[in-house]
Image (spheres, rainbow, N blue to C red):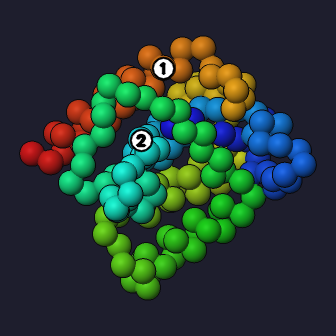
C-alpha cells in the first residue's frame, strides 16, 4: 500500500478538478510504519468471496505472496480526523462492536501523531519514506521495499497466531 498525502502533510480538501496526483503528490508507508496496520489490500477477488472490512482479508483464502500490486491509499484527507475520533469514541463507549482493538489503536496512533505535528502528517519523518509519486509512475525501489514490508508482516502475523 502506498499512502498518499498532501505535499506539506496537511489533511487537504480534495477537489476533482485539481486531480489526485496534484492534491496528494507524496506517497509513503504511513499505515504500516506509523499506525502498525496491515499494509496489504485485496485488489482482486472472485465473485462470491466475501472480503473483510478494510479489504485486507478474505476468510478462508490466502494472498498470493509472490504477486505485489500497489494500492494508492488516498484516505488521508480533510475530515478523516473527525471520522477517526468518532471511531475511537464509539468503540471505547461500546456503541460499536469491536472485533479487534487494532482498528481503534491505529486510529489513536494517527490522532496522537497529528496532534504532535500541528494537525499534519510529518512527511519529513524518514521512517515513513514519503516521496513524490504519481498514479502513472511508481517511486524508484518501491517493489523491493514493498516486498520487505509484506514479508515482515506475514512473518509477524504467523508468529502471533502460534
Q: Is residue 43 among the parts visible in the rendering?
A: yes
Q: Secondary structure at mark 1?
A: helix
Residue at image coords 84%, 52%: 16
The answer to whether residue 37 is left or right of residue 5 is left
Q: Residue at x 52, y 71 (%)?
A: 87
Q: Are marks 2 and 1 in contact (CB under 8 Å)?
A: no
Q: Which of disc 1 and disc 2 is earlier in sequence?
A: 2
Q: Which residue is pictured at 60% across the width and 39% down the height?
A: 72
Residue under circle 1? Answer: 143
Q: Residue at x 77, y 42 (%)?
A: 20
Q: Is residue 104 above or below residue 11?
A: below
Residue farthest toward the right in the current orientation of the protein: 17
Say left or right for 87 vs 76: left
Q: Residue 73: name its quadrant.
A: top right
Image x and y of residue 132, in percent: 72, 25
- On residue 40, which mark appears? 2
x%, y% of residue 52? 37, 61
The C terminus: image quadrant: top left
Amino acid at each position: 500500500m502506498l499512502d498518499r498525502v498532501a505535499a506539506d502533510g496537511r489533511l487537504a480538501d480534495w477537489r476533482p478538478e485539481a486531480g489526485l496526483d496534484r492534491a496528494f503528490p507524496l506517497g509513503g508507508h504511513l499505515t504500516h510504519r506509523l499506525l502498525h496496520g496491515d499494509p496489504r489490500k485485496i485488489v482482486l477477488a472472485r465473485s462470491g468471496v466475501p472480503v473483510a472490512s478494510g479489504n485486507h482479508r478474505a476468510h478462508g483464502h490466502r494472498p498470493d505472496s509472490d504477486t505485489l500490486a500497489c494500492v494508492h491509499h488516498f484516505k488521508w484527507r480533510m475530515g478523516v480526523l473527525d471520522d477517526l475520533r468518532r471511531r475511537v469514541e464509539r468503540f471505547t463507549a461500546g456503541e460499536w462492536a469491536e472485533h479487534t482493538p487494532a482498528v481503534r489503536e491505529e486510529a489513536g496512533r494517527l490522532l496522537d501523531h497529528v496532534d504532535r505535528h500541528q494537525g499534519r502528517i510529518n512527511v519529513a519523518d524518514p521512517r515513513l519514506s514519503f516521496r513524490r509519486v504519481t498514479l502513472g509512475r511508481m517511486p524508484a525501489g518501491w517493489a523491493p521495499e514493498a516486498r520487505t514490508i509484506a514479508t515482515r508482516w506475514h512473518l509477524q502475523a504467523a508468529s502471533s497466531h502460534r
